[in-house]
Image: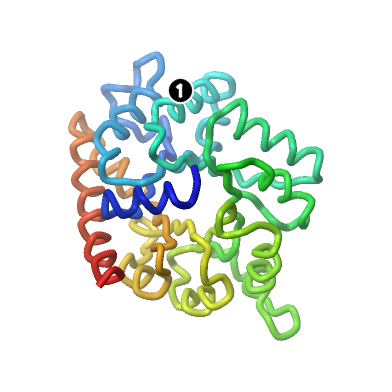
């Protein structure tokens, strides 16, 4: 998916919501537990209930890889079921020496039809470059994350700058705003103004809203650019809104609340 296509979807749906399909088999409703493909059945219902309200789905691959071949099959069926006009993210956090990253890129961009993949930049440019060689595909590089451990490295000074600032300024030169995004955690809202100065034109994937306590209002006011420039992810708050047979309806209700709030911020951007 190109940047223009993504921006068009944001404008059309008045949404920059990304629904995280971090599907934990132990948390899906009891009536699905005995289904031979419970994960896909759950995902399918969530997608059907929310596809008109979001512009992206993020599949955290760990929740699928944990089940071996069966999990990979559920992941493939899920990503293939998502409508083509919706941006798909493999939250896999890959990144290795060049020839290995090349194989990761083939796995997620060729064997599986994802539009993007999250990438760890620790090993440098040659570990990220293979993901940037595909037209219409994106690398979403870890910038400043929302977990407690971000303070161990990302928020440590390297000279005058924080390490995450060095990552943003350096990695932004490896690709362009047409094929490169950054992961910026919602719980780091106080840093968004500074981050936007470093990477004014890039999109950010923003996890941490909802169950992790990030503020959609703060993020939207501090981090939007002229194209919106945000994909705000909510996972547990949406997909586990109910543990009963009404789980899809409950998920839709929460997703709609996010979408309606996002529409307000988008209207402000355009006026």
Give the side of residue 178 with respect to residue 126, left or right. Answer: left
Give the side of residue 6 with respect to residue 253, left or right. Answer: right
User: How many discs appear?
Assistant: 1
Give the side of residue 232 with respect to residue 92, left or right. Answer: left
Q: Measured from the top left, where is residue 170 in percent x and y?
A: 70, 67
Q: Secondary structure at mark 1?
A: helix
Query: In the rendered image of this protein, does residue 247 appear above or below residue 149?
Result: above
The residue singled out by tag 1 in the image is: 77
**Residue at (60% x, 49% y) in the render:** 139
Query: In the rendered image of this protein, does residue 203 appear above or below residue 192?
Result: above
Query: In the rendered image of this protein, does residue 20 appear above or below residue 28?
Result: below
**Residue at (36% x, 30% y) in the render:** 43
**Residue at (66% x, 57% y) in the render:** 175
Q: Measured from the top left, where is residue 87 in percent x and y?
A: 44, 42
Q: Measured from the top left, where is residue 129 in percent x and y?
A: 73, 49
- Applied colour scheme: rainbow
Q: Measured from the top left, where is residue 16 in percent x and y?
A: 35, 54
Which quadrant of the structure image shows residue 180?
bottom right
């Amino acid at each position: 998916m190109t940047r223009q296509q993504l921006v068009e979807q944001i404008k059309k749906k008045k949404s920059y919501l990304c629904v995280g399909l971090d599907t934990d088999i132990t948390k899906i409703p009891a009536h699905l537990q005995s289904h031979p493909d419970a994960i896909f059945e759950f995902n399918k219902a969530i997608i059907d209930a929310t596809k008109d309200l979001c512009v992206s789905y993020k599949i955290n691959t760990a929740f699928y890889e944990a089940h071996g071949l069966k999990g990979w099959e559920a992941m493939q069926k899920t990503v293939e079921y998502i409508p083509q006009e919706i941006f798909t993210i493999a939250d896999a956090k890959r990144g290795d020496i060049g020839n290995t990253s090349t194989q990761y890129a083939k796995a997620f961009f060729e064997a599986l039809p994802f539009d993007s993949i999250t990438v760890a930049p620790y090993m440098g440019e040659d570990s990220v470059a293979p993901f940037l060689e595909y037209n219409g595909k994106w690398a979403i590089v870890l910038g400043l994350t929302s977990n407690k451990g971000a303070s161990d490295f990302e928020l440590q000074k390297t000279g005058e700058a924080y390490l995450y600032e060095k990552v943003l300024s350096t990695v932004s030169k490896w690709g362009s705003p047409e094929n490169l995004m950054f992961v910026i955690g919602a719980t780091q809202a106080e840093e968004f103004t500074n981050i936007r100065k470093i990477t004014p034109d890039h999109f950010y994937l923003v996890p941490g809203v909802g169950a992790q306590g990030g503020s959609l209002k703060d993020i939207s006011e501090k981090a939007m650019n002229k194209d919106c420039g945000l994909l705000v992810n909510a996972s547990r708050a949406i997909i586990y809104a109910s543990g009963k047979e009404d789980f899809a309806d409950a998920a839709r209700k929460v997703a709609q609340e996010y979408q309606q709030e996002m529409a307000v911020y988008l209207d402000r951007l355009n006026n």
